[in-house]
Image: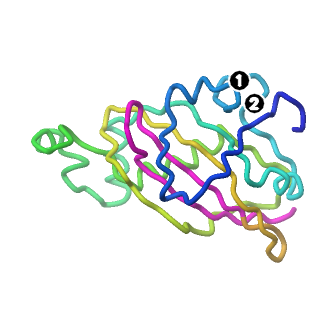
Amino acid sequence: PGDSAHRRRNDGGGDLMTHSHVWTHADAHDPGRRRIGDDDETPLRISGIEELKAHAGEDLGVTGWHDVTQAEVDAFAELTGDRQWIHVDPERARETPFGGTIAHGYYTLSLAARFLEELLQVDGMGVMINYGINKLRFPAALPVGDRVRMHLRLGAVDDVPGGVMVTSELSFEREGGEKPVCVAETLMLAYAS
């Protein structure tokens, strides 16, 4: 991963919650930005804890778009028991400022697992598990029928007994949206094999 095919932009970040840039189509055409479909770019393949540490602070780019369907939102509502009408009643939701149903915020966050696989593959670990979330906000609604994608920045990779704590900054955008629909700073434990 030191070769030119793996160059990525490191934004330097700043506080995730005050980060106001929304990743746009122009960003997707930035030659320094990783994106789905680039040869040898996605996903970034990392083998072991030391290599994971070497990538700390790197911008890993954006995923492909995912269609948000009413069927998925309804299934999420059934699974979680969150059947609030703004998510599952298109007729009633038409009368709201959103003009229709919107996805649950936690549905959006749950897409992180799907999107993460598009950007990062880590081998040579015993196990990687979710540890928690430092920050989580839903700055804008995600209307059903829109498309969403995720931007990932690998943050700190800190030693813990038996492995490392990985901090990641996730930002979900809807196509054509002015603000992110979800921003999160997540924590994951990675244990050596």
Residue type at mark 2: give it: Glu
Relative to 116, is 128 above or below? Answer: below
Magenta range = 166-193
Q: Is 190 left or right of 174, judged from the image as shown?
A: right
Main SS class of the magenta portion in the image: strand
- Residue under the image location 49 percent in, 31 percent down: 24
State the residue position of label 1.
38
Distance in Å between CA atoms under marks 2 and 1: 5 Å
In this view, which residue lies farthest toward the bottom? 161
- Occupied quadrant, residue 168: bottom right
Scheme of colours in the image: rainbow
Crowding at dot 2, Cα within 10 Å, few <14 / some 14-19 / many 20+, comes out as many
Apparent side of residue 123 relative to residue 152 in the rendered image (left or right): right
Q: Secondary structure at mark 2?
A: loop
Secondary structure at badge 1 equals: loop
Give the residue pinned by disc 2: 41
Residue 25 % position (x, y): 51, 26
Are the residues at dot 2 and dot 1 in contact (C-beta closer than 8 Å)?
Answer: yes
